[in-house]
Amino acid sequence: MMGLKPASDYKWGHAINNQLLLDQTLKDASVNAIEADIIYSEKQQQAVMGHPPQTDSALTLDSFLQQLLRSEFQSHQTQTIVKLDFKSQPAFDASLDLVARYVEKTQFPVGLWINADVVRGPGGGPSVFDVGAFAEAALTRISDKVVLSLGWTTGGDSAGVYTQEMVQSMHEVVSGRCVDGGVCVQFAVRATSVVDSMQVLVPLLDASEQFGMTLWWSAYCLRPEELQRMRSRLHAWRERVFYDVCIEQ
């Protein structure tokens, strides 16, 4: 992806949703990609860091972004990634101005990935987002150069696969402006499902050179041989496939 390091060069910090984890991550020079979740706090009436079923957090999104700026974590020189995973429409709506100001200061929009689960996926329920409005707001109110990270809702079954219908729904999301406008899109795919779903997922990768895939899984660490199997199947798209997974040592 233009402006970033090769995909295999990134080491991810996953679910960096509290102050302790943020402090540890910013001190770890080996971590050059941060994934964090955002919820809406009714109590504080603002976006905060956390993952459902959490409803509140001591770390606000505003503080999170300010600390990233002070640490100079992200710039054209560092080529780091910050992936913000929005868990609800209110969380996203409350974040737009904060995130737009953050991008204005870093001047590195390709390093900012705006994520939401916008299509029903394996074991998942319906999305809580209006996908068209989500993409339009990200590209117009934040920056048309940010990376749209689009995922499927999911359940707890690690063996679930992506179906043709699920992938077609996602293709319909990106077939207009994203393809014609050269928007950078990362499809967030469960790592445990990718190998058995490759046949239906490949058309998404082939739709545009600006489209890639981020394999994620947080329930447990994957075995090295599992990772190698994924890399082998995705070798043709290796420059566009990122791995936000934990590997057994």
Image (cartoon, rainbow, N blue to C red):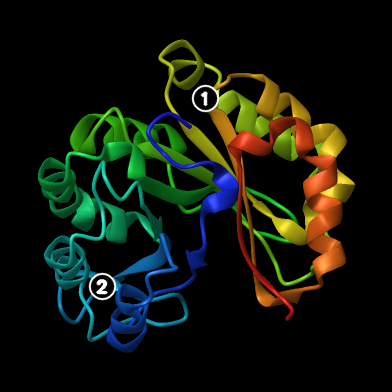
- What residue lies at 20% left-to-right and 74% top-to-bottom? 60
198 vs 124: above or below: above
Residue nearest the viewer, comparing 180 with 32:
32
Q: Which residue appears at 60% of the width and 49% of the height?
A: 8
Tell me the tag on residue 210: 1
Residue sitting farthest toward the top: 180
Q: Nearer the viewer, residue 76 or 94?
A: 76
Which label lies toward us, 1 or 2? 1
Q: Secondary structure at mark 1?
A: loop
Q: Give the mark nearer the N terminus: 1 vs 2.
A: 2
Rendering coords of residue 197 (x, y %): 84, 44
Q: Residues within 10 Å of mark 2 (few under 14, many from 20)?
A: many
Frontmost residue, 95 versus 73 = 73
Q: Is residue 68 above or below residue 120?
A: below
Q: Which mark is residue 48?
A: 2
- The answer to whether residue 69 is left or right of residue 137 is left
